[in-house]
Image: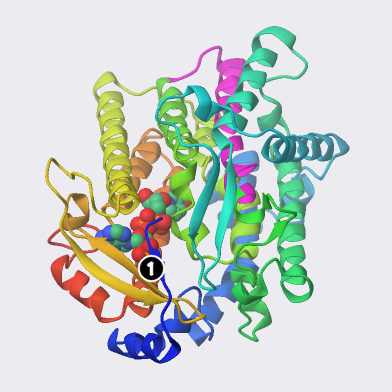
Amino acid sequence: MAAHQEKKPTEERNRKSTQNGTRTSQVQWGRAWEVDWFSLASILFLLMFAPLIVYYFIMSCDQYQCSLTDPVVDLLTGNKYLSDIWNKTPTLTYRAAGIYTLWVAFQVVLYVCIPDFCHKFLPGYVGGVQEGAVTPAGVVNKYEINGLQAWIITHMLWFANAYYFHCFSPTIIFDNWIPLLWCANILGYAVSTFAMIKGYFFPTNAKDCKFTGNFFYDYMMGIEFNPRIGKWFDFKLFFNGRPGIVAWTLINLSYAAKQQELYGQVTNSMILVNVLQGIYVLDFFWNEAWYLKTIDICHDHFGWYLGWGDCVWLPYLYTLQGLYLVYHPVQLGTANAIGILMLGLIGYYIFRMTNHQKDLFRRTNGNCKIWGKKPEYIECSYMSVDGTKYHSKLMTSGFWGWARHFNYTGDLMGSLAYCLTCGFDHILPYFYIVYMTILLTHRCIRDEHRCFSKYGKDWKRYTSAVPYRLIPGIF
Ligand code: NDP
């Protein structure tokens, strides 16, 4: 564990917390207790418009060849009414409901019923039962890490079906894309609403619940920190990773199959999207144990933001490049293809190495080598709600000495590479880089606010030592 526990008499603990510079740090870290008007306005905006945004993007591909402007022009010129667009939209079908139910049920079975065996034969892979970070209430949860296994089994079955069994067409996802959107929405809203009710009436750990008193904020950002059913079914780990991220690579494969069916070939741009996003997804599952220490699991509560976001936003909007390439099959010149591949791989390298450096540093409590040298760091401390004091370290070596979130910079380079595969004819595929830039910049600010609440003046020492957030010398 990164932090180790140190019990002290109450007076001593309180004195230490004041010394740390923020008397409130005992209870304030984790998501907000109070809602400011800007957060509330953003949340209301997202609750109202995020589902519409997803619908608009997918509909514009289905009805307007991925043009984002044509539907608006049609509506403004009276060429079409909203009802025309809506009436042309495929509805929920029994077939889609069946596919989606089977899909989610299969992922639940893989998650709950098959303990990890990959860590027994894959050198370097960390799977099986692993511990998460200390929660604000001082709890350390255990997780069954078997996402890589779920991904491998799912994809083996997919290829076995595509090449041997032919029980369904590999284009099945593309062919049912909008009916499946309704199913994903039903699950997303159901799970978020259930999580809210559960937070009020039967929370897994009452001390890790937060109630702001604002219904919309609580619904969006979640009440429970780590809602679970039984000992092992963890909502955050399941919905974050599966079904959404396991589906990501299958969705791309389905788009590639559709290109093959429509045009008799798969373009190099589609292959690039499949490869680069495939690396990202595989990396996620290879490092699922590391993921337990990321903001999603360590700091975010489980509400609509994660529940609906993982079911709908992620699978539908993170895969827009592949969807676009079905409608516009781009064949890149060799130089462009190599350039984009390099950008994607360098971005991935930075993303992975930065995350790896922090993980190694935290796992070994600083007893490791970063770029061949013993890492430099700033000692820091914080309190959990019960007043227990913990110690931690903030590294200032390696990529973490260049910028405070260089992992986000790598992620953004990779995201740009996916978009560039689609050429410059339409803006729709570029939604991803715009969204990721907003998401990661906002996340950066949110994380730093939280770290300041947690570490107080120790965090200030860190920001003085590493003054830039994303791009050294610029931001
Ligand atoms: P980080 O992995 O950067 O984790 C931030 C946390 O790390 C801080 O809260 C702090 O936690 C600790 N920390 C900060 N600075 C240091 C330091 N110098 N030394 C040691 N520990 C430090 O952020 P995320 O969890 O947001 O992101 C993880 C990865 O996931 C990123 O690469 C990001 O790009 C990616 N990501 C991708 C998304 C997507 O949709 N594709 C969405 C979100 C993230 P502590 O309290 O433990 O000190």
Q: Is residue 394 magenta?
A: no
Residue type of the residue flagged with mark 1: Asp
Query: Looking at the image, which residue is at 32% across and 74% down?
Result: 381
- Residue 67's place in the image compared with 397, above or below, is above
Q: Which residue is mark 1?
A: 447
Q: Please name whichever residue, 320 or 40, is drawn nearer the observer in this view of the structure.
A: 40
Q: Please name whichever residue, 30 or 249, is drawn nearer the observer in this view of the structure.
A: 30
User: Residue 138's spot in the image, x, y percent?
Assistant: 52, 70
- Residue 207's place in the image compared with 405, above or below, is below
Q: Please name whichever residue, 365 or 243, is drawn nearer the observer in this view of the structure.
A: 365
Q: Is mark 1 within 8 Å of ligand 1?
A: yes
Query: Looking at the image, which residue is at 64% across and 73% down?
Result: 223
Whether residue 437 can be seen here = no
User: Residue 51's spot in the image, x, y percent?
Assistant: 65, 59
User: Residue 95's spot in the image, x, y percent?
Assistant: 84, 34
Image quadrant of ligand 1 equals bottom left
- The magenta segment: 238-267
On the rendered structure, is 343 left or right of 212?
left
